[in-house]
Image (tube, grey):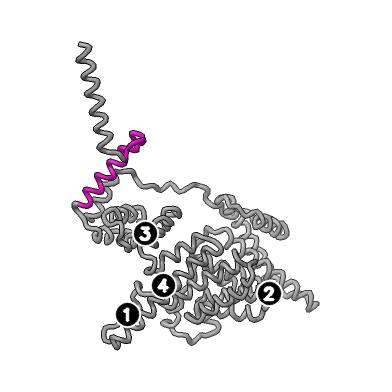
Amino acid sequence: MGGQAKGKKKNKTKRKGNSSNGEPGLAGLSPQERMKVRMHEKAKKKTADKYSAQQLLEKTEECMDSFDFEMASRFCQRAVDLDPTNLQALDMLGHIHSELGDTQKAKGVFLRAVELSPDEGHSKYMYLGQIHTGQEAVDYYTRGIQILLSAMDKQAQTTQELAGAAAPSDKDPELPTAKDVCVAYCSVAEIYLTDLCMEEGASDKCRESIEKALHYHHDNPEALQLMANYLFSAERNQEGRDYLMRSVGAWLPALRQREAPLVTEEEHMQNEIPLYECRITTAKLLVETEEYETAVDVLEGLLEEDDEVVQVWYLSGWVCYLQMERARDQRARDQKEATDEETEEWNALKEAARSYLTRAKKLYGKLRCDDRPMLEHVEQLLGELGGEMEGEEEADPSLDEDYEPCSEEEEEEEAAMEH
């Protein structure tokens, strides 16, 4: 009996050894981790049997178009599993990880794309430039610009050879454009204005990058604003103001209607609006240059677009306070009694400033912001204006309780593919 028991034990040990040898990649993993790996491999095999990489990328694009980046990442990852050297799949997966806020995963994917194809595709270099700083970021942007310019040269040559008969459309989003080059040079210029501002020759390199940006897109609002910022830093304030107003005039509807009332609707629509963060910078510069009315136009547009940004409420209150102070100083210089209309306007500005700043302070607490100097300035201004507004609507402190119900990953993907 003892011999039989030993034999059974020996056979059992042998079977365990065979199982481990059959899946060497699972050694050292916990049972839960081994199960997850096995399920992933099973799902990958099932996907490969039913769908091609191209079909998966088509579903990825559909999910991205509907802003379902979680599902898009699943489809795209399956495509990469099927075809690990597919540059289109890698580029899409990198951007999806970026949208989901997973910087490290995005970086790994884009570096893999660089390894596979270092001389084609500029977008991976642009993203790598965004997530790096200093000279390393400049190097990535510079490499991306080189590839952009090379692709544009080839595109121009192809167009000439075809003599326009079947030339690729300038509106094709896949083709590189002069605007892409402009935006890339703007990114380089921003680094020389910030991270590398203390480096030798930084000022000259910054201006050179901005001039190149404007060479490729002469009325680009971001490039014009960067030139304004550069000129302000060089204490060339009037030139800076001129560039700033050119930048704002390229896209702000209210300003265009005041300065160029005959502009057509088609021409107006062709002027692209800069990103939200860029327009916050625009508002700051307008306040600094005492272009208060235009700053109000910009800030009102920002609040209409997103009213959960503390800085925009703060700037709105600040600019109303400055308008109020300017009106009071003007009356003091003129040594005149204020008219009823002027007094009413002054009181309206005061109440508007209190309202905006009260909202800024409450939203600051709700969002748990970390900008102590801004909060201190808000409190200082409110103190001068008579304190917070009574009865100002409280910002809803409740957290977002929306959620996606849990279900099997494979079932979700199957349902999406069949949709």
88 displayed left or right of 212: left
Q: Which image quadrant for residue 380? A: bottom right
> Which one is in front in this view, the residue at disc 3 or the one at disc 2?
3
Please tell me the numbered disc located at residue 147: 4
- Mark 2 vs mark 1: which is more N-terminal? 1
> Which one is in front in this view, the residue at disc 4 or the one at disc 1?
4
Q: Residues within 10 Å of mark 2 (few under 14, many from 20)?
A: few
Residue 121 horizontal/vertical position (percent): 38, 68
Do residues under tags 2 and 1 come within 8 Å of each other at their CB atoms? no
Q: What's the magenta bit mostly, secondary-structure-wise?
A: helix
- Mark 1 vs mark 3: which is more N-terminal? 3
Image vertical order of residue 28 relative to residue 48, above or below: above
Q: What whole-number distance in Å separates the C-alpha atoms at marks 1 and 3?
A: 27 Å
At horizontal 22% and vertical 52% (from top left) the residue drawn is: 48
Query: Label 3, on which residue?
Result: 67
At horizontal 64% and vertical 81% (from top left) the residue drawn is: 239
At horizontal 25% and vertical 58% (from top left) the residue drawn is: 53
Front-most of 376 and 164? Answer: 164
**Residue placed farthest to the top in the image?**
1
Query: Label 2, on which residue?
Result: 341
Per the image, label 4 sits on a secondary structure element best described as helix
> Which one is in front in this view, the residue at disc 4 or the one at disc 2?
4
Q: Quadrant of the N terminus?
A: top left
Do residues under tags 1 and 3 come within 8 Å of each other at their CB atoms? no
